[in-house]
Image (cartoon, coloured by chain):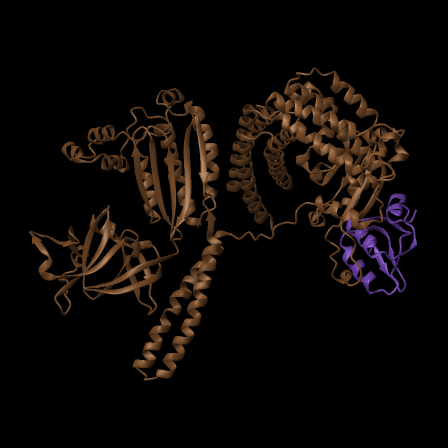
Chain colours: A purple, B brown
Amino acid sequence: MTIRYLKKHAALEGHVAVDDAEALAQWLLQQREPAVHLGKCEDVHGAVLQVLLALRPTFKSSPADPLLARVLGLA
Amino acid sequence: MNQADLLDQFVIEARECLEAIGKRLLDVEQDPDNDELLNDLFRSVHTLKGNCGLFEFKPLERVVHAGEDLLDRVRHRTLAYSAALADALLEAMDYSAQLIEQIERHGRIEDGADAGSIAHASALRAFVCDSASASSAEALAALPVVAADPASGEDVTPSWMSRLDLAAFASKSGVLALRYLPEEGCFFKGEDPWRLARTVPGLLQLKVEGACAWPQGDERAAWDCYQCNLDIVLCTDAPRAEVEAHFRCVAEQVAWCDATVNVRTAAPPSDGAVSPLLRKRAAALWNDQCELLARAGHSAGTVRAARRALTNLLSCVEGAAASAASASLAELSEEVSASSLLTWARSNAPAAEAVVVATLSPDARMPDTDIAAVLPRIEDSPPAAPQKVLKVGQEKIDRLMELIGEMVVAKNSLPYLAQRAEEVFQQRELAREIKAQYAVINRIADDLQHAIMQVRMLPVGAVFQRFGRLIRDISRKLGKEVNLVVEGEDTEADKNVIESLADPLIHILRNSLDHGIELPAVRRAAGKAPAGTIRIVARQESDRVIIEIQDDGAGVNAARVRDKAVERGLIHADQAATLSDDDAVQLIFLPGFSTADQISDLSGRGVGMDVVRTAIERINGGVELTSVQGQGTTLRLSLPLSMAVTTVMVVESAGRQLGVPMDLIVETVRVPACDIHHFKQARTTVLRGRVVPLRALNDLLALDAAPIPNDAGELAVLVIRHDNESVGLLVDQFQGASDIILKPLEGVLAGLIGFAGTALMGDGGVLMVLNPKELLQ
């Protein structure tokens, strides 16, 4: 499990694989104020990145990877 | 989809690719400057290579890869397309076809294939190396020119460049910018564009956007997160080759631009003053002039006009570079030749740089937020949406057609039911209702049948495609010059008809090439153009497809045909003498006929035209030949549109129902018994002033019964066509026409002579369908 869906945010951890993209998208769409934690996220698959870019949840913490952070507009 | 299915799919697609490649290679040979053709050719080869990569078919991949590299050079104009190159490519494609055949048969490539594949690959590579030694720097220099080519339809500096902050790397050299637009379905192929982009060697900067706008509001719920919509731009300082290798799997989705050049040319600020639109127009006009000069055969006036246009263009595009260029233009002599002016124009195209400047200059830079401005540009570039095509095995279509056939037969039983309801059970009302229902079902069944026919229809061009190659190869071997003209390749016919057409047509073309078209010297002596023309014309005439193969060669020598036919013992000498020239020409259709004194590997073995005729007749077609000596020969093939449904005439004879194919029937008449002349065993009658031999169907079928005349003493005569003659069959009664699905005789009945097959009738009975041709022999 690389995504933990918590009450107020989803925590993306480690390498988030392509299979998780759809579930994440669905979850984000259901939230009134969608938010994700990327603090422990090492890397995401392109499809997951696309979900994050398209649905623009609030990012509670930036990922360790500076490239990813920059693409998501966090740095 | 399991591995075997995948492999089948691969074989089908590989075949298609090879066919497309073969065709394109010939097209390109005709028109080597056509970028669109070249790109198309490259794409086909690239697709094939990509497919090979899916499996471990090393030998195949090696050859195709070499071909791809070679074509890439040709595409970028760093290597000229030549006949030798085309030969090598065609041979390599033939070899690939062999390999694919092996794959289809055994699921793998045989062990011995490695040597062959290396030989072919190195033959192709040899071309690449030759040109590489010329100059690799030239290749780089050529790139901006290619980008400015009007045919490619792209701007000199792509708009996406503005998304990168190149100023930060202005001091660096060899900075390469690229845009990676992954295809929509890439996630399903196991690709991860983000990973690919972020692992680029020497990555300096990376930006990601949505290729189309991200979904808003309600669109979000329906948004498919597995349709890739990423648009990645990045720049790197790694060598281009290394970056290319990194993107080798998705090379066609990547657009390149040399950022260094552009950043540097951006330096002189004075050039930025001219509006970008003006620059663009100027660049287009400049290219137009280049194209004009590149055309063959122009007068001195054209050159002067082009020169004036170039000067004017330079004067309106101000700037240091432009003024230097106009100075050098002025230095060219007044009577400059078209080619030298062209070289000058190509090397001095100032507009190309200028447009780069314009787009990069701060006032012209596209603001990132202006989506409306960005969108149309993006829509230009993404790969075309995949066509919605369903690939279905032929056996499934055949099964569907069989079912529809049964449906047609089953629905035909309803009128019988209605009749029974009325006659046996005295239920008029019910009978009428059944008939009404029948009308509805009948209409649907007809539509169904029509629809399935459409599915099975193929354009005849499908078989014509391979002829270009055939003619090219054979005419080269024979030292003849031949142009192939194909018309009406969109004409459609049933798949089975089309497929059974291929072999006869190849025979015909070989014959035309070998016997018809003369050597260039002979043609010139006869006052014809040295290059012969073979014209294949297809068209639809009512429910038949007509294909005419016409050559402007020597024509058939009737006297020689007569002699040869007698010599070979095919007909008797005095019989031959009575034949008219037109009839004598038809002798070439006799089995075992050949006029060639020498047996070549093309034709002359005497298995030519009779094979053609048998093959065409097997699919209910006909062949006609007309030939004018010294002017050429025309073969006219007439084929049925579809073989699925046959119309037959149902006749009754000695209490039996029999079907006769409608296309053979000339007419049905009733002849008074007194008008029938008896001469020994033979019976004849005179119809419209012509003597028609009569045969009793009962006799032909060995039924011991005399034909029954009707109350007026008339006999029913079914006049059919047999070998261009009319023959009358005496039957008892005509029962009208019927559409049937003809089932050939199979199994124990297969050897039965005189019958074409059987069909199921609406009342459940079996109708035997006659083959009058066999019956009368």
Total marks placed: 0
**Residue at image x 79%, y 43%?**
B232
Residue B66 against residue B439 in the figure, above or below: above
Viewer-nearest residue: B354 or B451: B354
Instruction: Tell me what residue is drawn at x 33 percent, y 61 percent.
Output: B759
- Quadrant location of residue B408? bottom left
Query: From the viewer's perspective, is B408 left or right of A5?
Result: left
Q: Position of residue B640 (x, y in %)?
A: 37, 50
Q: Position of residue B286 (x, y in %)?
A: 71, 30
Location of residue B265 in the rendering, given as x and y in whole percent from the top left corner:
84, 29
Relative depth, front residue between B543 and B127:
B543
Determine if residue B218 is in view. yes
| B251 displayed left or right of B773 | right
The residue lying at 38 percent from left, 38 percent from top is: B549
Residue B146 in sight from this viewpoint: no
Q: Quadrant of residue A65?
A: top right
User: With respect to residue B59, does A19 lie above or below?
Assistant: below
Give B640 or B486, whichever is nearer the viewer.
B486
Q: Residue furthest left?
A: B680
Answer above or below: position of B529 versus B764: above
Whole-percent x, y for residue B700 in the image: 18, 55
